[in-house]
Amino acid sequence: DAKTTQPNSMESNEEEPVHLPCNHSTISGTDYIHWYRQLPSQGPEYVIHGLTSNVNNRMASLAIAEDRKSSTLILHRATLRDAAVYYCILRGTQGGSEKLVFGKGTKLTVNP
Amino acid sequence: ETGVTQSPTHLIKTRGQQVTLRCSSQSGHNTVSWYQQALGQGPQFIFQYYREEENGRGNFPPRFSGLQFPNYSSELNVNALELDDSALYLCASSLAGSVWTGELFFGEGSRLTVL
């Protein structure tokens, strides 16, 4: 099964950009790259997703490498509320069934 | 607030017992998936149900089973509990095809402790 690799932790200062990397070298051609984040004592929350092209939404940007073996979640101006564990996830189908693979996540600390 | 509710929020069982966890999906969502999250780890996909049929499963033994009801609410059943089953169990609801369109909506989870 394809899997994702993320750094265990990263640190940023408030109002600075943050680049969270994810490696997924065994991604299949039909897997979408999704990012979720999880605050303490809460379920994961959707951030962004993409297939091949870079994507932007109100929360973040997703930069996907041309070979799709890695991606980077970009928070343009980190706030204290962005402190969370960020998960890079592959979602796709296999034999008609959906499959999802979570990485171990990156714990983001945002300093005031 | 995702509209996905899980019950119970916490429970304690002993090894060998059976447990049923429940999930109420967000209105209009016809797909539910379940995850196990051990302390300090990322969620692990257990299985997914679409229109009352299992349509995807992770690497979990058959003692992990599920049901989805016509109103799209769902249950996760675990038989013969083991100590390693202690974890946060999350459910997520979505619309079929959301693998392409986007979001899973997660509940806040049920924390199971097996003694």
Image: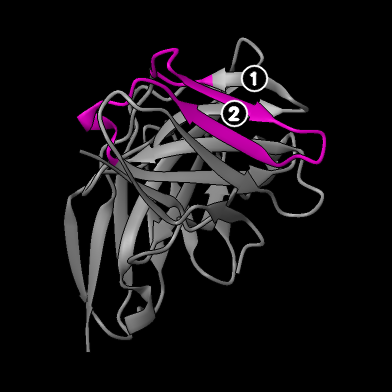
Magenta span: B57-86
The local crowd at label 2, few if under 14, some if 14 to 19, many if 20 or more residues have their Cα within 10 Å, is many
Amino acid under disc 2: Gln
| Residue at 53% from the left image edge and 52% from the top image edge | B7
Mark carried by residue A68: none
- B52 to A86, vertically: above or below: above
Residue located beneath label 2 in the image: B48
Circle 2 chain: B
Q: Quadrant of residue A88?
A: top left
The alpha-carbon separation of the residues under discs 1 and 2 comes to 6 Å
Q: Measuring from the top left, give residue A112's x and y in whole percent.
A: 22, 90
Out of B73 and A99, give the one closest to the viewer: B73
Q: Is residue B50 left or right of residue A94?
A: right
Q: Measuring from the top left, give residue B62's x and y in whole percent.
A: 45, 12
Is the residue under label 2 in contact with that under label 1 (CB below 8 Å)? yes
Residue located beneath label 1 in the image: B55
